[in-house]
Amino acid sequence: MFALNLPQFPIKVTKRDGRTVVFDELRRKYVALTPEEWVRQHFVHYLIHQKGYPKGLVANEIPLTLNGTAKRCDTVVYDRTARPRAIVEYKAPHIEITQKVFSQISRYNMALHVDYLIVSNGLQHYCCRMDYEAHAYRFLPDIPQYGELCPTPGGEPGLTSPR
């Protein structure tokens, strides 16, 4: 499909009913392979295998209601108490990441109130930490490791899963 600024991995792509589909390990099913889905699958693999995000605490296509309208977050990362800590929004590689994209993910955050917002088109990745007291966010130089995103008090991991 597209070369991305993310590690390659053995992605499972096949044809079903005349269309190309990709296996989503988080949803445990094949889904339509779109340019955005290509980015999602690579980014989730990166979070789990490069950044230490526990597979059971990362979920795709999370529904939420915003001003009476049904929406879906591309990916939500939870802490070990099942509290949402980050929202990830994906765009296709040819889509430029603009303020409009950050406005979209910020609206989703009105419902989830997470600490981190991450946006990627597979070529560029941005992560910002929310500062609710200052009503602002601060861009980080890199996507944090899971332990930075969700530090565990006393170093003891919890066992709760959001599913």
Image: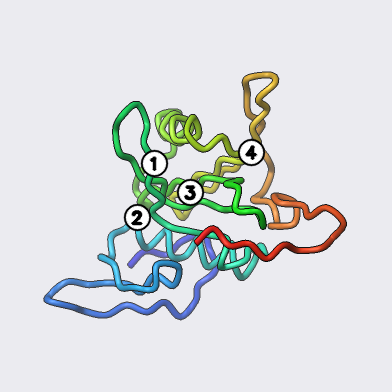
CA distance for labels 2 and 3: 10 Å
* Residue bearing mark 4: 115
The disc, 1 or 3, on the residue closer to the chain's N-terminal end is 1
Q: State yes or no: discs 4 and 3 in contact (Cβ < 8 Å).
A: no
Q: State yes or no: discs 2 and 3 in contact (Cβ < 8 Å).
A: no
The location of residue 90, given as percent across then percent down, is 42, 49
The disc, 2 or 4, on the residue closer to the chain's N-terminal end is 2
In terms of depth relative to the viewer, which is nearer, 137 or 95? 137
Q: Name the disc covering residue 111, or none.
A: none
Q: Nearer the viewer, mark 4 or mark 1?
A: 1
**Mark 3: few/some/many CA within 10 Å (<14, 14-19, 20+):** many
* Residue bearing mark 1: 64
Q: Nearer the viewer, mark 1 or mark 3?
A: 1
CA distance for labels 4 and 3: 17 Å
The location of residue 38, given as percent across then percent down, is 37, 63
What type is the residue that disc 3 sits on? Ser
